[in-house]
Amino acid sequence: MAMSKKPVYSDMLKGLFKDYKGEYANLLQWIPSFFNLLQKMYSSNELNWQSKFKINSTFSYFAIPTDLIPDTLGAEGYLDDFFICAYVLNELIPEYPKQLTKLWGGKGDILAIVPKALDESR
C-alpha cells in the first residue's frame, strides 16, 4: 500500500503565498523557507535550550490565528508572523552561522537575507 504524503504546515504556507502579488510579496515569499529553516534548526542537536525555546515560541506564535495581525486577513495577516521568524533567525546568526547556511537549502545567502528581511519588515 502506497503511503500518501502528509501535508505539513510549510506546504500550507507555500499555497497561501504562491499567488500573492500584494504590497508585501517581496517579504512574504520568504515565510515558507524561513519556517522550514527554523524547523531544521530546532531538530539540530547543536542548538542550546535557549535557542530552541526561541524557535518553539515562534512556532507557537504561528499557531495563534488572532495574533497582532489576524491571519484571517489572508496573506497580509502573516506579516507579524514573518517578523517573528526573521527576528529569531537574526538572533541565531551570531551563534549558528554555519548551521544556518548548511540547513538553508534556499536561494541566496541566508546570512544576508535575514537581516535585510528583518529590516524591511519593521
Image (cartoon, rainbow, N blue to C red):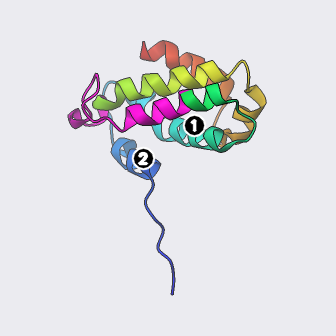
Q: Main secondary structure of the magenta part?
A: helix
Q: Does the stretch in magenta take in 70?
A: yes
As measured in the structure, the alpha-carbon distance from the residue carrying label 2 to the one carrying label 1 is 15 Å
Q: Amino acid at mark 2?
A: Lys
Which disc is residue 117 wearing?
Answer: none
- Furthest toward the front, the residue is 49
Confirm whether residue 106 shows in the render: no
- Magenta range is 54-76
Q: State left or right for residue 55 relative to residue 110.
A: left
Between label 2 and label 1, give the one nearer the viewer.
1
Q: State left or right for residue 6 relative to residue 108.
A: left
Give x and y (percent) for residue 67. 29, 27
**Which residue position is annotated with label 1?**
38
Viewer-side residue, 115 vs 22: 115
Residue drawn where x is 68% and y is 29% of the image? 109
Q: Amino acid at mark 1?
A: Leu
Residue 17 vs 86, above or below: the answer is below
Residue drawn where x is 74% and y is 26% of the image? 97
Quadrant where the C terminus lies? top left
Give the image quarter of residue 43.
top right
Give x and y (percent) for residue 33. 54, 40
